[in-house]
Amino acid sequence: MNETQFLKNLQQKAKVQASVDGSSPLPQWARPLASLVGLHYWQFLLVISCIIAIFISVWLFPEVYATTRF
């Protein structure tokens, strides 16, 4: 493959990549957050599960967590 064919092929792949990048389902500002969650998904799941567990336990058993005493 000569140099001109290689450059044409590279330009075509760059156009495809630009169209894929432009048609992403996520907005530009959410991509770093999605990348962070994707890289550290176990830690993310741990934090989210603890928050949900605390919320559900307070919601289901409000008498345990009541602040007023009679």
Image (spheres, helix red, strand yellow):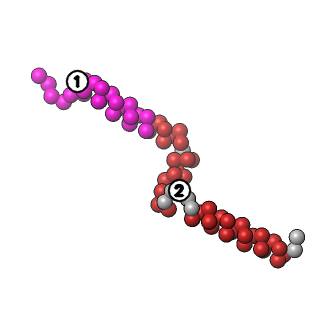
Please report the residue visible at 67 percent of the width from the left and 69 percent of the height from the top. Answer: 15
Q: Does the magenta stretch include residue 56?
A: yes
Q: Does the magenta stretch include residue 4?
A: no
Q: In this view, does 66 lie to the left or right of 39?
A: left
Vertical arrangement, residue 49 with respect to residue 63, above or below? below
Q: Residue 5 carries which label?
A: none
Please report the residue visible at 29 percent of the width from the left and 30 percent of the height from the top. Answer: 59
Vertical arrangement, residue 35 with respect to residue 8, above or below? above
**Nearer to me, 1 or 45:** 1
Q: How far across and how far down the image is residue 40, in percent?
A: 54, 44
User: Which residue has dot 2 on it?
Assistant: 25
Please report the residue visible at 21 percent of the width from the left and 28 percent of the height from the top. Answer: 66
Q: Is residue 56 left or right of residue 42?
A: left
Question: In 3D space, how far apart are the residues under numbered discs 1 and 2 (Cα atoms)?
Answer: 44 Å
User: Which residue has dot 1 on it?
Assistant: 63
Please report the residue visible at 33 percent of the width from the left and 27 percent of the height from the top. Answer: 57
Q: Is mark 1 on a helix, strand or loop?
A: loop
Magenta residues, start to end: 48-70
Q: Is mark 2 on a helix, strand or loop?
A: loop
> Where is residue 8, by image quadrant?
bottom right
**Nearer to me, 43 or 1:** 1
> Where is residue 63, by image quadrant?
top left
> Where is residue 49, by image quadrant?
top left
**Nearer to me, 55 or 20:** 20
Does label 1 or label 2 sit earlier along the sequence?
2
- Looking at the image, do the residues carrying marks 1 and 2 touch, with CB atoms under 8 Å apart? no
The quadrant of the picture occupied by the N terminus is: bottom right
Q: Nearer the viewer, mark 1 or mark 2?
A: 2
Q: Which amino acid type corresponds to the residue marked 1 in the rendered image?
A: Glu
Q: Which amino acid type corresponds to the residue marked 2 in the rendered image?
A: Pro
